[in-house]
Image (cartoon, grey):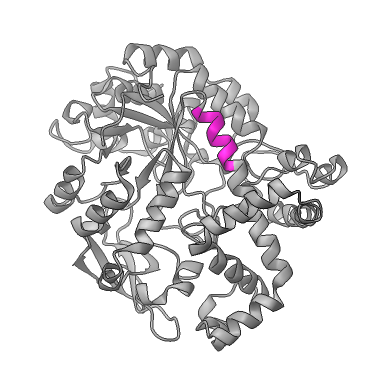
Amino acid sequence: MRFPRSCGCLVHPTSFPGKYGMGDFGFEARTFIDFLERTHQTIWQVLPLTPTGYGNSPYASYSAFAGNVYLISPDVLHKKGLLTEEEIKGIQLPSGLSADYEASFKNKDKVYKLASDRFYKNLKKEEEEAFNAFKKQNQHWLDDYVLFMACSLHYDKQPWNTWDKDIAQRKPKALKAYREKFREEIKLQYWLQYEFNNQWNDLKKYANDRGIRIVGDIPIFVDHNSADVWANPKYFEVDEQGNRQLVAGVPPDYFSKTGQLWGNPLYKWDELEKDGFSWWVDRFKHMFNACDAIRVDHFRGFDAYWEVKATAKTAEKGKWVPGPGEKLFDTILEKCGELPIIAEDLGFVTEGVEKLRDKYNFPGMKIIQFAFDSDSTNSFLPHNYSQNSVAYSGTHDNDTALGWYNTTNAEEQHRARTYTRSSGESIHWEFIRLGMLSVSDQAIFPLQDFMGLDSTHRMNIPGTSSGNWLWRYTPDMLNEVDEDQIRHLAELSNRRFNTNS
């Protein structure tokens, strides 16, 4: 579908300031939305909101459906009467430029149990009906997920295929026994997902009421150590014991000389197709309910994906295999109706990828940082954009604009200065201006670029497994952003009003 001409900001909730070691859905989230409204921005793009696994990556999750419960705000729980002021004071942590996930998780786990116990103890009829309705509506993933998490905690978060054989292979007697054994933990996990859902929906409404649409993110692949693979092994390239056989990645590219070996088990697309891609339909329906639009990560993988043996050490030796293509998206279109999707079509884009993207009118992504490594035909230069696209200065996988300029070669710096007719000193604003004034229907910029931050503030370095996803900002940093400049560019580029709001 086509999107209205608009602009916005990319920042994940974990990056918000706050008193609990990481950003959450509380006061600072609303402060950020107020900033968007004041500056005439009508898009807030987030990374996946699912539970984080290894390395705290939102792209390595225990579930494709569940919410990251550590985004639940203790302050909101206090307002609901589920926590005392003394209890939330007791879990406060210093707020800086880096998330302290370990301490935050530990502290929040303490108070979540208290809040959950009070929720169940004081459950009124209306709330109980809403809770039961939530559980029923999400039964297709929730029942398996809460049991998976209870077992995962029992087995110290070790991969599910290393658990006791009977529960790993989902023997009916074992499933029944473990549900009884971990009854209390399962009750907590149900409440956590219910509370996450309520707090997120309240925050989304706060944004939508101010004309701001939320763009979510759906990774194409799921983590091996997830409720999805454990509950649906027939859909994934795993053997009878649950060991991975074929895994995902990408061949050598701009980001990595040996490619990226992601390690996610590949799908058995033939099996998925047999029941009408029901798992994928459920996933898209879930995402469209949670967000106003979705960025589909690694869109290329739906046309063709890089298949690597699970025993491989790098992604260099693999092969391209045809993906589900139109069969999948025709089904999703039929089941879900209009598809507000942004296709992440970066990397080497084939004719097949373009054909699949364009058939459904999905906008692709244009990254200004990629525009200066060749001549005037470079597709990432704004004069080569199409309207049905999204312009970015960079994404969560890129350096900041200022960081890119300070570390790239002299030739690219020269091209960037020439193209922007600038000295390069404020290259972040030059890139924002280019994106704003481009013909792209949407222009989205990482918050770090509005703040003019250097490489030390980037969110992720692809191909590395530690030190990522940690970035946070302080209230002062947001207050110091040049809001007049953003408003001016939104007005100048005719991006102020969202015709869908």
Residue at 79% x, 57% y is 117
Image coordinates for residue 477, horizontal then vertical, percent: 59, 26
Q: Toward which corner of the image does residue 425 lie, by quadrant?
A: top left
Question: How many labels, in total?
Answer: 0
Q: Which region of the structure is painted magenta?
A: 200-208
Residue at 56% x, 66% y is 143
Is residue 407 visible in the rendered image? The answer is: yes
- Position of 78 compared to 170: left or right? right
Quadrant assignment for the N terminus: top left
* Rendered position, 116 above or below 389: below
- Position of 342 compared to 80: left or right? left
- Position of 319 compared to 139: left or right? left
Viewer-nearest residue: 419 or 349: 349
Is residue 98 visible in the rendered image? The answer is: no
Residue at 43% x, 25% y is 42
Viewer-nearest residue: 286 or 52: 286
Q: Toward which corner of the image does residue 147 lie, by quadrant?
A: bottom right
Image coordinates for residue 273, horizontal then vertical, percent: 26, 68
Image coordinates for residue 49, horizontal then vertical, percent: 51, 49
Residue at 71% x, 39% y is 76
Quadrant assignment for the C terminus: top left
* Rendered position, 206 above or below 124: above
* Rendered position, 66 above or below 168: above
Q: Which residue is most to the right?
A: 86
Magenta segment: does it hold 376? no
Image coordinates for residue 328, horizontal then vertical, percent: 25, 58
Viewer-nearest residue: 114 or 285: 285
Please name the predominant secondary structure of the magenta segment in the image.
Answer: helix
- Position of 96 compared to 277: left or right? right
